[in-house]
Every structure is written in C-alpha cells, then in structure tokens.
Amino acid sequence: MWNYEKTLQYPVKIKNPNPQMAKIIISQFGGPDGELGASMRYLSQRYSMPYDDVKGMLNDIGTEELGHMEMVGAIVHQLTRCLSEEEIKKSGFDAYFVDHGIGVFPQFASGTPWTAATIGVKGDIIADLVEDMGAEQKARVTYDNILTLADDPDVKDVIRFLREREIVHFQRFGEALSRTQQRLDSKNFYAFNPSLKLKK
Amino acid sequence: MDKNELQMQLLSYKFCLQELGLYLDSHPHDQAALTQFQQCKENYNSCKAQYVREVGPLVREDVTSTEHWNWIDGPWPWEYKEDDK
C-alpha cells in the first residue's frame, strides 16, 4: 500500500517559466518512456514474479518512479505557472492550453494521452526484466534529448538527477536478469516460465 | 541550519536509505550494507525529528496539533516559492 511523504525526492526550483520547454518535458510525465509508464510497468510486473528479490526490486523501483513522476509534474507546473497571452501564443503552448489550461495532463509531447500500450507486462521473468532494461535506456535517451533542447540550468540540474537514476535502475535490472539466468535450469531456460504454475 | 539546508540534509539521508534499500533487495545478507542502513536510519530519524519541528509534517502521522491540521499547509512540494535560491 502506498503512503505519501510531503517532499520531492530532489528539489525542483525553476525560476523562469518557459512554456516551450514544458511542452517537451511533459513527455517524461505521461509519454511513451516517461515516469508514469515506468511506475505502472514495474508495479504491474511484480505480481507474477517468482523470486522475493525481484518482487522487492520491482516494488521499490516502481515506487520511486511515482516520486519521479511527481518531480516531472513539478517541473511542468513551474514552467507554466505565470504566462501572458502573448507567451502562450508565441511558444506554441496554445494548443495544449486550450484543452488543459495550466493543468498538468499525462500525455506524450506530441499530445497523445498516456497509454498502457507503451508498457510491457508479459508475466515471464526474462521477458519482463529485458523489457525493463530497454525501458530504462529509452528513458535515459529521452532525458539526453531534453538536455540537448534545454538551456535553463535550473531545469538541467533536475533532469541530470533523473537521468542518473535511470542508469542506476538499468544496472539493478541487469543484475536481476543475471541472477535469474543463473537460477533457471540451463537446459530449458526459455522453455519454462517459473511464474506459470499450471494445474495438472 | 536554515530550512533549505535542513531539507537538503533530510533528502540526502532519505536518498541514502533508498539506494541502500535497492542494493539490499538483491543482497539481503550483506552485513556491511545492513549495518550501514541502520546507521543511515539513525541519522535520518534525528534529522527528520528536527525537520518536522521546524518545517512541517512529512507524513500525516507527524501531525501533533489538536488545534490545526497543518498537513494541508503550503507550500506543497511541487510549488515554486519566490524566496527559493
């Protein structure tokens, strides 16, 4: 069950609003490789995992990703917190603004609403761990792209923290995959799914 | 220590617990890490006690007042405060 702690994991203090950046960064809130997706993927995968250490890892990383989603939401909120009509039009933020105002809506930068179609939950430990490693890399690339597009040091500082976390998570998933491969019967590692206990 | 420094200290201890926790998820018998976790927890607990006294509640159970539900008092974590550095 989840409790809420009234703090961000890392501070978000964006002095200068910038709706153009908000349109881009929102992709890590509700986009294909964003924090909402990461959290839902890991928290959903944990149910069918056969090993305690993997359940623990998915549980704890999935929980951390909710905190990251909150940080990205804070960035988008602070980037759009006081805008003039002219800024809204000039930045191209008007298309988002007409539907959501300065609300923070979970969507891709392109405007597609968040969808579970971007996450994989296969119920197979190998498929799921490899999916997770891919997901962390895709998130890392997205943060790299944001760093390329952003100039504001207040924004870049937070993005670098989030990017580092993706790399650490990638390491953890890789270690879990390696431990799992050692545990499974080497004769039929792809043929048997330890999560599937069919009744005879 | 001012409120910002106190908050940064709290976040550092919390981060330490998070990283150690993730490591311990896959190395549950690592004595050194387990000991470090307990030490970090002690630092965190005393820092948190000071934070709750001087800044505000971290979880709802931290509220002690029988006059005022300060859980809802601003600022909320996503808000920008003009006096922030």
Image (spheres, grey):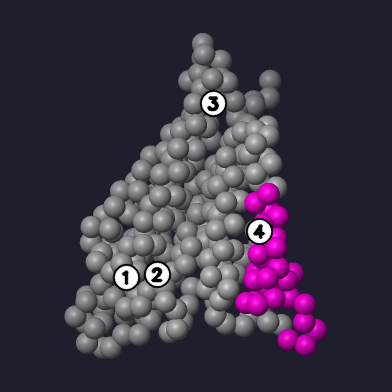
Marks 4 & 2 on one chain: no
> Does residue A23 appear to the left or right of A167 in the view shown?
left
Residue A115 visible in the current orientation = no
Reply above or below: A99 against B15: below
Pointer 3 local density, CA inside 10 Å: few below 14, some 14–19, many at least 20: some
Q: Is residue B48 magenta?
A: yes
Task: Report the magenta residues as a range.
Answer: B39-68
- Name the residue that disc number 4 marks: B44
Name the residue at 52% across, 32% down.
A176
CA distance separating discs 1 and 3: 40 Å
Dot 2 or dot 3: first in sequence order is 2
- Name the residue that disc number 3 marks: A179
CA distance separating discs 2 and 3: 37 Å
Image coordinates for residue B5, horizontal then vertical, percent:
53, 70
- Name the residue that disc number 1 marks: A22
Q: Quadrant of residue A136 in the image?
A: top left
Pointer 4 local density, CA inside 10 Å: few below 14, some 14–19, many at least 20: many
Chain of the residue that carries numbered disc 4 in the rendered image: B
Name the residue at 45% across, 43% down.
A168
Q: Quadrant of residue B35 in the image?
A: top right
